[in-house]
Amino acid sequence: MRSVCITVLYLCLACVLPAEDSARTAAFNAGQVAEDEARRRSETRMVMDLNLKRAEEHRKAKRYQSAAFLYEQAIGLARRLGNMKAVEKDVAKARDGIAYSRLRLARELQDLDMFKEADEEVLKALAYDPDNRRLRKFRESNEEVRKAHIGRVPSRTVRAAIQNHRTERAKVMTLVRDGKAFYDVGQLGEAERRLQAAVRLEPQSDVAYYYLRLIQEARNDLQGRAREYNFRKRVIEVGEARSR
């Protein structure tokens, strides 16, 4: 009878101990998961705060495209946290930043008569702040300005060509100024290289040709002086040779 009782006791312990181990393992796993989740949230919040700080710096520096991108990234991170209520102020700040930055970009595009692109910038901001009155008002005014400009401004192709011409013209003037500066200090080779590059960009550049002529005259003068010097040196050598 006693042996039977001992056997039953061992069987009960064998059943109870694994159950207790499983309970402890489950509790440990749950605690580890909670710890990992807390660390993930903390890291996400740190990155979100960093993006907001960098976005503000870009905004103050008038780098609106970069600022808008970082504000949008901050909102994306806030959504990953899962508790938007806890970061409500930061999200509101990011939305305001997006609206401000995208609106500034839209106005710059409108000034260039790029009405479609301006509208697209505003739509990007409205995706984050649908009820923003400033954004909606700009869309309306942008459409009015677009219609008013129909038939009154050159086509986009012509405007692009004009802008390209202005860019090329600026390059030419920079090369000419550089060439003149090198000419003034007597570095004729460097001056000529700059001026020839200017002529390749703008074959009708009278200023570039003017300095190229001055460079050629300066070289001719130097060659003439060299010939005169060599001639006099030769005369002196011949005279000294006869007097010996």
Image: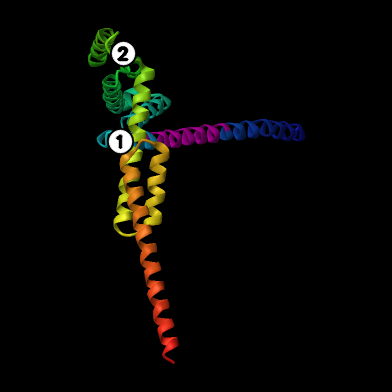
Numbered disc 1: secondary structure: helix
Q: Mark 2 sits on what residue?
A: 130
Categorize mark 1 by other alpha carbons within 10 Å: few (<14), some (14-19), many (20+). some
Categorize mark 2 by other alpha carbons within 10 Å: few (<14), some (14-19), many (20+). few
Residue 157 shows in the view: yes
**Magenta span: helix, strand or loop, mainly?**
helix
Indicate the position of residue 3 as horizontal and vertical percent values. Answer: 76, 35
Amino acid type, mark 2: Pro
The Cα atoms of the two marked residues, 2 and 1, are separated by 24 Å
Indicate the position of residue 243 as horizontal and vertical percent values. Answer: 41, 90
Task: Give the tally of numbered discs.
Answer: 2
Task: Answer whether residue 29 is magenta in the image.
Answer: yes
Residue at left offset 37%, top offset 46%? 195
Specify whether 244 is left or right of 27. left
Tell me which corner region of the image, top left, top right, bottom left or bottom right, holds residue 183: bottom left
Q: Mark 1 sits on what residue?
A: 58
Image quarter (top left, top right, bottom left or bottom right) of the C terminus: bottom left
Specify whether 105 is left or right of 203. left
Q: Is residue 194 above or below residue 84?
A: below
Instruction: Please provide the residue range marked out in magenta.
Output: 26-45
The single residue placed furthest to the bottom in the displayed view is 244
Tell me which corner region of the image, top left, top right, bottom left or bottom right, holds residue 151: top left
Indicate the position of residue 92 as horizontal and vertical percent values. Answer: 28, 24
Residue at left offset 36%, top offset 48%? 212
Q: Is residue 238 above or below residue 153?
A: below
Q: Which residue is at the front of the view, 236 or 203?
A: 236
Image quarter (top left, top right, bottom left or bottom right) of the N terminus: top right
Indicate the position of residue 154 as horizontal and vertical percent values. Answer: 32, 15
